Every structure is written in structure tokens, then in C-alpha cells.
């Protein structure tokens, strides 16, 4: 079985602020840092740090060489990464004193993914292999339909949610990862149990994994419904917490098929990620997750 994460790579400019800036305001940041991120990159790194061999596909610009270097360091295969004559995607991220963030994205090379690239890349994968996707690249409907046609199992985190995501796109998904805001946008309820039922009906082939921040996470799939309380930590930066959860959950479920242990491991890894600043670099290695005791 091969695992392909097809998604975005962003240069993240992270501004630490007391409070988020408001319209018309000029605000001094407390500090600024540059990190590598993007939901596709972060999820591939999380899966690799959790011990899953993973390929990363997507587009960077001439300024994106650092992503290849990091892929080599963390063990992500970058064979299917294309270089385009456009700037690498970027994000301006404000992180406030409570560790919450807000993100302004510039798609750049992430929006240069073509149907041909998708066909060519997926041509190297077989029925039963796994695609991990998000919503920060061009040609997403093509990516999902091509993966379905080739018999790949699809893990989809339709984030950031926008008008391009429609409920009918869930029909081919094997693992759907959403937070409470995304779930409400997709199914019109803010009640976790109702969301799980409605989303499960929309994804008849698969399982729904709903993350609720500090309220925990839930799983609804053929094995049943399970709840995992969140581990209690002091959050300094929630950037990439959801990506850490997705990568770790998949690494665990693909290894032993047990949703309860996948939820627990993913919750612990993402709890550790929010105690650190940054994007991909806040994602812990499996050995750190294993040796850290959290309540
Ligand atoms: O999920 C966090 C990521 O969202 C950041 O790294 C940023 O690049 C945006 O894609």
C-alpha cells in the first residue's frame, strides 16, 4: 500500500500579536517568524513523523527549495512535487495570546496544479493505495474523481471550507476529517451527534472524524461511534494542530485499523503540537508522543 498526500505548500509568515488586528487598525506585532507550512505539507509531515511512508505531490515555485530539503530530513518522498514559474504559496498568520490563529492565504503555485499533473501522478498508484487531500490546491474535483476512478481510498480534510465544497463531493470519501465549524457548514447543525449522523449519510463508504478543539474528537464509522476527550495542555499556537491530528490518525488506522487508538494517538500528538509555535515544525515525532505523559 502506498500513501500519497496531494496538497498545498505554503511559506508561513507568523505574527505573534496581543489581539487580532481589526479593520482600519495598525498594530505592532510582538514578534514575527517564518515557517514552512501549508495543509498538504503539514499533513504529509505529520504522517511521516508518525511512521507512515508518504509521497507528497503539489506545486512550489523557484523559492520553494526549502520544502524539498525538509522532505528529505523528515522522510517524505518529494518525487511528485512540481516546480512552476510562480511564487510558492504563502500565508500571513496572526497568533494571539490565547494561541488562536487567523490565516490569510495566497495560493501562488498551489493554484497551478493541472489535470494532467493529477492524471500523471495518480497513474503511479493502484487500487487500495491512499490519497490524502485538503482544499488549498486547484483541480480538487479532478483529484477526487481521478482517485476514485483508480480505486484509491480517499482521506479528505475539506479545509479551508469554501463555496467550492459541496456535500455531493463526500460520496467517494473513506475518511472525512472536519472540525465543528466545517461540519456545521456541510450539514447545517452544530450538534456533534447530529453532524456525525448527517455526515455519515453523505459518506456512505467511510468514516467521519469530527474534531471539537478542547472538547475532544469523535469517530463515526462501520465499527461504531467513539469519543476521545482532548488532552489538557497550555496552547501557545494552534497552527497545524488539525493537520497533526489528520496525519497521526491515518498513520495509526492504516497500521492497525483500530479507531479508538487512532483517535487517542492523534489527540495526543495534536495536543503536543499546540504547545509549540510554528507549522510543520510544531508536529511531534512519534517517539516524543510515546514518551510524553499527558492527562
Ligand atoms: O493548517 C495550517 C496551515 O494552514 C498553515 O501552515 C497555513 O499555511 C495554511 O495552509
Image (cartoon, rainbow, N blue to C red):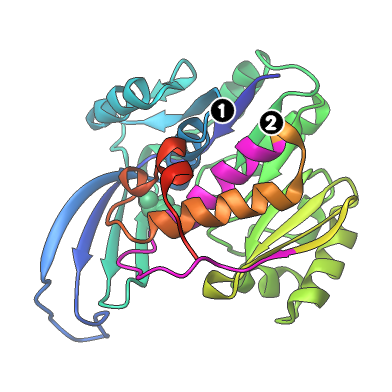
Total tally of numbered discs in the picture:
2
Using the image as rendered, state which of residue 87 and residue 267 is in the foreground.
267
The answer to whether residue 133 is left or right of residue 111 is right
Using the image as rendered, state which of residue 253 and residue 261 is in the foreground.
261
Q: Residues within 10 Å of mark 1 (few under 14, many from 20)?
A: many
Q: Quadrant of residue 28?
A: bottom left
- Considering the numbered disc 2 on the image, is that residue within a helix, a strand or a loop? helix
Q: Is residue 289 magenta?
A: no
The answer to whether residue 78 is above or below residue 21 is above
Q: Is residue 231 magenta?
A: yes
| Image position, residue 135 (x, y; %) | 56, 50
C-beta proximity under 8 Å, tags 2 and 1: yes
Q: Which residue is mark 1?
A: 52
Estimate the spatial distance between the alpha carbons at disc 2 and disc 1, rounded to whole Å: 8 Å
Does label 2 or label 1 sit earlier along the sequence? 1
Query: Residue at coordinates 45% horizontally, 41% vertically from top-left?
Result: 8
| Image position, residue 195 (x, y; %) | 78, 72
Q: Which residues are magenta?
A: 227-253
Query: Residue at coordinates 60% horizontally, 27% vertically from top-left?
Result: 4
| Image position, residue 235 (x, y; %) | 35, 69
Q: Which residue is mark 2?
A: 255
The answer to whether residue 88 is left or right of residue 156 is left
Q: Quadrant of residue 25?
A: bottom left
The answer to whether residue 14 is left or right of residue 287 is left
Q: Is mark 2 within 8 Å of ligand 1?
A: no
The answer to whether residue 260 is above or below residue 70 is below
- Considering the numbered disc 1 on the image, is that residue within a helix, a strand or a loop? loop
Residue 114 seen from this side: yes
Amino acid at each position: 500500500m502506498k500513501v500519497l498526500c496531494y496538497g498545498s505548500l505554503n511559506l508561513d509568515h507568523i505574527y505573534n500579536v496581543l489581539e487580532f488586528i481589526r479593520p482600519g487598525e495598525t498594530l505592532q506585532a510582538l514578534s514575527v517568524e517564518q515557517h514552512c507550512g501549508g495543509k498538504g505539507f503539514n499533513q504529509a509531515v505529520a504522517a511521516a513523523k508518525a511512521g507512515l511512508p508518504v509521497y507528497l505531490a503539489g506545486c512550489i515555485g523557484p523559492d520553494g527549495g526549502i520544502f524539498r530539503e525538509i522532505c528529505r530530513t523528515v522522510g517524505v518522498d518529494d518525487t511528485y512535487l512540481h516546480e512552476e514559474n510562480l511564487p510558492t504559496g504563502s500565508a500571513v498568520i496572526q497568533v494571539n495570546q490565547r494561541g488562536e490563529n487567523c490565516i490569510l492565504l495566497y495560493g501562488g503555485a498551489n493554484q497551478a496544479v493541472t489535470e494532467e499533473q493529477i492524471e500523471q501522478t495518480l497513474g503511479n498508484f493502484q487500487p487500495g493505495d491512499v490519497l490524502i487531500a485538503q482544499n488549498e490546491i486547484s483541480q480538487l474535483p479532478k483529484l477526487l474523481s481521478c482517485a476514485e476512478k483508480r480505486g484509491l481510498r480517499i482521506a479528505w480534510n475539506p479545509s479551508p471550507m469554501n463555496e467550492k465544497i459541496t456535500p455531493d463531493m463526500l460520496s467517494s470519501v473513506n475518511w472525512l476529517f472536519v472540525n465543528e465549524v466545517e461540519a456545521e457548514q456541510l450539514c447545517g447543525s452544530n450538534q456533534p451527534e447530529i453532524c456525525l449522523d448527517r455526515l455519515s449519510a453523505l459518506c456512505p463508504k467511510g468514516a467521519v472524524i469530527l474534531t471539537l478543539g478542547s472538547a475532544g474528537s469523535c469517530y463515526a464509522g462501520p465499527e461504531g461511534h467513539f469519543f476521545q476527550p482532548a488532552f489538557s495542555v497550555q496552547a501557545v499556537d494552534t497552527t497545524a494542530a488539525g493537520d497533526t491530528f489528520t496525519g497521526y490518525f491515518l498513520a495509526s488506522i492504516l497500521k492497525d485499523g483500530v479507531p479508538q487508538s487512532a483517535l487517542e494517538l492523534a489527540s495526543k500528538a495534536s495536543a503536543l503540537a499546540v504547545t509549540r509555535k510554528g507549522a510543520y515544525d510544531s508536529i511531534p515525532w512519534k517517539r516524543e508522543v510515546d514518551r510524553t505523559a499527558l492527562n
